[in-house]
Image (tube, rainbow, N blue to C red):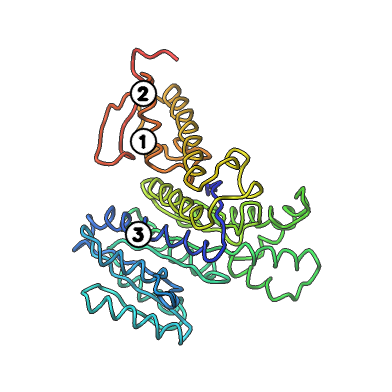
Amino acid sequence: MAKGTSSGLLDEHRAQSIFKHTILATYVMPFAEMTGSRAPNRRVVVLDGFAGRGRYPDGSPGSAELILKASANARRAVIESILVEKKPSDFALLAEVVGEYRAAGVRAEALPGEVLRHLPTVLERAQAVPLFLFLDPCGANLPYNKLAAVLASDRQASWPATEALLNFSADLTRRAAGALKAGLKDHDALPVMDRTCGGPWWRQVALDAYASSPAGDFETAAFRVVAEYANRLGAASGMHVVTVPVRRRAHHQPVYHLVFLSRRTHGVWVFADAVARARQQWMRALGPAADDDVDALFSFADTVDQQIESEQRAAEQAVVRNLRAMLVSVGPIRLVDHVWAVYGDRYGVASESTVRKALRTLERAGELEVVGKAQQLRDFIVAAPRSFTP
């Protein structure tokens, strides 16, 4: 089942890009190093299907260059980047950026045209090795049937590892749902949504959501459609799914949702920390929030760092409660096997360091014992001490 986060992020002067790029900067490398250790020659393939220019005019890296940087800095994996861009002028600039990294020894290739045309090449290149798909178009994403076919092909097995991060446009959903509600059966957004969703099933979902919406808008429709889309894609591919709303401001409707898919809870755990870090970068990009932009819990804070600190303290308390309840009812657990129960509704808000603090809080209180330590926190095995009585 798809899991949604409560960490909807804002967009003001590229804040959306900051969020997505923070995830790439903090997730692609762990994915490559987690999975590349088992791959032939430690190879990992990463696709950016809508790569753009690769670098912004001010010199800051776009998604493609962030992937290239990860490839250049990887020590325990060999990342091979395939970067696709259909707009000729943007592709010319992308090719220049890729050329710089290739000259430095990075394995990367820039390909012009539609990403669908290049998917067979990507899959062939990624045979027997891990594959990460980053698909972030400005509008509609790949047709559902094409995407599901890739994820549900022979890559549906647990190995080689396959993960994806997709942009699902909430703006497009609302526009199509609005046209549907208005009876505009010939509106151009309707067939686009049909292709993106793999059929017209979204239409009734959107209309029912609108009918039940207290505000009489299509925000509920956008959430329900992406949740059903993610559930269907997860079921077809046998993957865990997370959805993350991305907003211009906290009280605005999402501009889009990011849909993350992973075959293992290890990916879901690491992605939680990546989203939490992205949220903090977003908060810093916007500066101190106004009273109408954040929960009342944080509106007293004068600085972004105070807001972040307050949020993490509250998240730590929530994780403490989650762990306390789990240990009483379940017994010894490996944290990564219970990622949703550990994070609860603070998934995408609590950083991994905050989870570590929660564990230490319970240890000091004599309510938790680490009975199996590991190199990574996620692989710790914890239990309630035998002498502890709740």
x, y percent for residue 239: 44, 52
| Name of the residue lying farthest toward the left | 41
Residue situated in front as seen by the camera: 300 or 230: 300
Up-down relation of residue 387 to residue 108 (above or below): above
Disc 2 to disc 1: CB gap under 8 Å: no
- The amino acid beneath tag 3 is Val
- The amino acid beneath tag 2 is Leu
Q: Earlier in the sequence, mark 2 or mark 1?
A: 1
In the image, taking residue 258 as reference, residue 378 lies left or right, namely: left
Give the residue at x 28% y 79%: 100
Give the residue at x 60% y 59%: 248
Under tag 2, what secondary structure?
Answer: loop
Quarter where residue 39 is shown: bottom left
Image quadrant containing the C terminus:
top left
Q: Earlier in the sequence, mark 2 or mark 3?
A: 3
Quarter where residue 150 is shown: bottom left
Residue placed under numbered mark 1 in the picture: 356
Up-down relation of residue 185 to residue 21 (above or below): below
Local packing at callout 1 (Cα closer than 10 Å; few below 14, some 14-19, many 20+) is: some
| Name of the residue lying farthest toward the right | 183
Up-down relation of residue 13 to residue 186 (above or below): above
Residue placed under numbered mark 3 in the picture: 28
